[in-house]
Structures are given as structure tokens and as C-alpha cells.
Amino acid sequence: MNTDIQILDMPLDINACINWVMAPECGGIDVFIGTVRNHTKGKSVLRLEFEAYERMALKEMDKIAKEMLQCWPLHKIAMHHRVGILGVGEVPVVIAVSAAHRDAAFDACRYAIDTLKETVPIWKKEIFEDGEVWVAAHP
């Protein structure tokens, strides 16, 4: 199995994702780490709350990984997303991709996060000092 797809309700282990994709035949590993920033659209963010339709989200994440493997000569893919309440600086998503060459790893990793944000049923609520709003997990 060359994919590790997970939705977790605990802190994500960045190093475990990187270590899982590492291999002696891979000269390129690209990692995307999404973090909760302290502001959005000019407002201070106190925290984010992520919810997922887990069964469908895992299915869509697996679909993304399969598309990546068809489009690029990749070795392994780790794609982890967190649900629950996350504070500023915490990590809601980690994507690690390994390949023999860096170009494939870079391109596939960007495709993974862009497609995840567009197609995977994960939603976030942004909590501000003066209110909150549910938004799709898009930039």
C-alpha cells in the first residue's frame, strides 16, 4: 500500500507523515503543512472548528491519491486531516509526497491540497471575537 489517508481528532504527527513516505529510491519529498492563522479577511481568529463527513471525505481523499499516482511517478502519499477544535498555530492538514525526482513531488503535493480543498467534504467554522461563520475549507 503506497497511500496513508487519515482523518483524525488528535494532533497530526508531521514527522510520522514524512518518515512514512521516505524511501532510499526517492530523491524528492514535498510536504504541505496547513496551520491555523491568527486572522482572516481582516478579522482576528480565535480558533477554528473542523467537521467532516468522514466516510465520504476518506473516499474523496483516496480518489485524489489515486489520481496523483496516475498522473505522476510517485512512491508514497500521506494525507492527514484533523477534525475538532484547533487553536492558532495548530495543524489541520499534512500532505507528504515522495518521488524519485522533486518536480513530481512538488506538482503532486500542490494538486493534492488544491483538490482536497475543492472536493473533500470537510468544513470549518471560523471563531472570531465578535462572532463565527461556517465556511468550506477553501482559501
Image: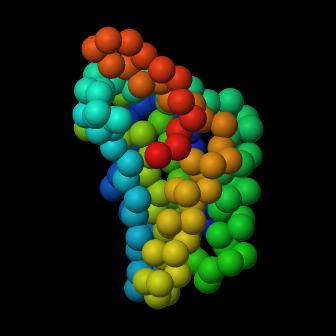
Instruction: Choose between 123 and 41: the one closer to the eye.
Output: 41
Locate the N terminus by quadrant: bottom right
Residue 31 place in picture, x, y as percent: 40, 63
Number of marks in the image?
0
Residue 90 place in picture, x, y as percent: 31, 36
Instruction: Choose between 24 and 9: the one closer to the eye.
Output: 9
Outermost residue to the top: 130
Instruction: Choose between 8 and 70: the one closer to the eye.
Output: 70
Residue 96 place in picture, x, y as percent: 46, 62
Q: Relative to 66, is 90 on the left or the right?
A: left
State whether residue 92 appears in this view: yes
- Vertical relation: 83 (above or below) 25: above
Identify the residue at image location x=53%, y=30%: 135
Identify the residue at image location x=37%, y=53%: 33
Q: Relative to 111, is 89 on the left or the right?
A: left
- Vertical relation: 73 (above or below) 36: below
- Vertical relation: 1 (above or below) 7: below
Outermost residue to the front: 42
Identify the residue at image location x=46%, y=75%: 106
Residue 41 place in picture, x, y as percent: 35, 35
Image-quadrant location for residue 108? bottom right
- Vertical relation: 56 (above or below) 32: above
State whether residue 16 appears in this view: no
Identify the residue at image location x=71%, y=67%: 67
